[in-house]
Image (tube, rainbow, N blue to C red):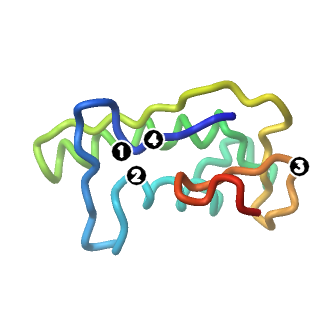
Amino acid sequence: MTAFFGSSALEFSYEAPEVHHGVFSFYVLQGLRGAADTKGNGRVTLAELERLVRECVPGHVRQSYKRGQHPELLGAPKRDDRCDRQGTGHGRLHAAGSMGKA
């Protein structure tokens, strides 16, 4: 099992009212919609998503709130971690509150 957390231990996760989400959620959604697809193949791997989120979240929070927020990915995927933008990839990515629900 793999879990992607919005911040490290002892940090807060900040909201971004201008996009109606938390900063972490905003970049995860952008990544899944294709912003993380660095290969341009219509698929977003967990590694690509992690790269986008780890690059964007800390800078956004630092600029907007003068604070730190560093997302953490824990656990290693045990199967294909790809998910295409149409949702037909073999791997599945779950939001923290929906683990186990398909």
Q: Which circle's residue, 2 or 1, is located before the other in the chain? A: 2
Residue 5's label in the rendered image is 4
Q: Residue at x 54, y 35 (%)?
A: 51
Binning the other alpha carbons within 10 Å of mark 3 as few (below 14), some (14 to 19) or many (20 upward) gives few
Asked if the residue under mark 2 is in contact with the one under mark 3, i.e. CB atoms within 8 Å, the reply is no
Residue 84 in the figure: left or right of residue 22: right
Q: Residue at x 30, y 39 (%)?
A: 58
Alpha carbon distance from label 1 to label 3: 27 Å
x, y percentage for residue 96?
Answer: 53, 52
Alpha carbon distance from label 4 to label 1: 12 Å
Q: Which circle's residue, 4 or 1, is located before the other in the chain? A: 4
Asked if the residue under mark 1 is in contact with the one under mark 2, i.e. CB atoms within 8 Å, the reply is yes
Please identify, in this view, whether the residue under mark 1 or under mark 3 is nearer the observer: 3
Q: Which residue is mark 2?
A: 24
Quadrant position of the N terminus in the picture: top right
Alpha carbon distance from label 2 to label 1: 6 Å
Q: Residue at x 25, y 71 (%)?
A: 17
Please identify, in this view, whether the residue under mark 2 or under mark 1 is nearer the observer: 2
Alpha carbon distance from label 3 to label 2: 24 Å
Q: Using the image as rendered, state which of residue 98 and residue 82 is in the foreground.
A: 98
Report the amino acid beneath label 4. Phe
State the SS at label 1. helix
Binning the other alpha carbons within 10 Å of mark 1 as few (below 14), some (14 to 19) or many (20 upward) gives many
Asked if the residue under mark 3 is in contact with the one under mark 1, i.e. CB atoms within 8 Å, the reply is no
Q: Which residue is mark 3?
A: 90
Report the amino acid beneath label 3. His
Residue 8 in the figure: left or right of residue 94: left
Q: Which residue is mark 1?
A: 57
